[in-house]
Amino acid sequence: MIEAPAPAEYDSPLYRAALAQLDETARLLNLDPGLHQRLRHPKRTLIVSVPTAMDDGTTRVFTGYRVQHNLTLGPCKGGVRYHDDVSLGEVAALAMWMSWKCALMGLPYGGAKGGVTVRPWELSRNELENMTRRYTSEIAPFIGPEMDIPAPDMGTDEQVMAWMMDTYSILRGYTVHGVVTSKPILLGGSLFRREATGKGAVHIFERACKAWRRDPAGMRAVVQGFGNVGSVAAEALAALGAKVVAVGDRTGAVRNERGLGIPALLAHARENGGAVSGFPGGEPLPLEELLAQPCEVLVPAALGNVIHAGNAERLACKVVLECANGPTSPGADAILAGRGIEVLPDILANAGGVTVSYFEWVQDTEHYFWEADEVEARLRKV
């Protein structure tokens, strides 16, 4: 077994967690040391400067990344993240997890990830477009339908993907729909893609409940993160009959022991820039108390490493449904296992997104598009 620290250029809490998981898996599988060593290192890493014209006439330079972990199974696949916590180590860890996720789901992809260190909520729409187009032009030699296919992640959405596709197409001289996924439908996007990650996770939870002979109806759920994934997961849990008793995002958290009205909370968030704080259908809850709320299922759907050795003892749930990437540290995994708390891991629980991204890529390649119910049925079959 290889025991070595993370390479200095990638060293970060998330990358150390990814390596710890890989090293333990390699030990259990008695993996060939040479293969183990290869998998510990990304195949290709790109760091770019992203000069961006701001609305006040100044220029700001952001740092962008694209990491391709492994291309053995096919072209790389992975999201693009806009957040002020983005670092090379974080992106490298997420790319590694994408390799495992694609392999687990039987997809012909390797893992990749990208991002820009930025606070997107502080940029105007024009500034966000300028930054996205420049970032795309800088990574363009390393992406493409048969090389590396980006998708949205935290801080990005279908509009960002549209800008990326348009910029890449301009550079190529013709329209290339398959360079990104999770695009607007009119640009070759797939029906059911927006809901795929959150609904896919709840489908995994539903299947697990059947195996455990538990009824999800009446279960209490706590959701951390109310973006595309967390909000859809909350809706899907409520549709199963679960009570979503607390929700939080970077702006704050709200709680209602009788259950938050999810349609009303969604409407409130839409009217307030995506924020759940101030929702009149619940009482304010300190963010640091969110993960410790009593519930049957805890749904981390935001950042990584939010459940760690320092707070794992405080969790008051029976199941962790990992909608985020890497939300539970290896140290916390051991604590949760010792406490009998089930963890539905991210590489399975949130794989609905990349699976439907694959379906979108196939539809773009064939120029033949499926109805939403067919996409969902194919996802459930996988």
Image (cartoon, helix red, strand yellow):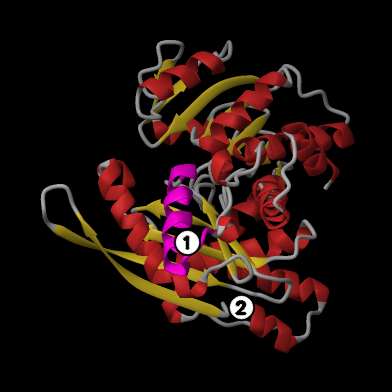
Up-down relation of residue 356 to residue 229 (above or below): below
Residues at circles 2 and 1 in contact by the CB criterion of under 8 Å: no
Q: Nearer the viewer, residue 77 or 159?
A: 159
For residue 205, say whether it is visible: yes
**Helix, strand or loop for disc 1:** helix
Reply above or below: 131 against 323.
Answer: below
Q: Is residue 119 visible?
A: no
User: Percent x, y for residue 236?
Assistant: 67, 26
According to the image, label 1 marks what residue? 169
* Outermost residue toward the bottom in this view: 34
Q: Quadrant of residue 269?
A: top left
Residue interval drawn in magenta: 157-175
Closest to the observer: 66 or 331? Answer: 66
The answer for how far apart the CA atoms under marks 2 and 1 are is 34 Å
The residue that appears at 52% across and 24% down in the rendered structure is 246
Query: Is residue 164 rendered magenta in the image?
Result: yes
* Residue located beneath label 2 in the image: 40
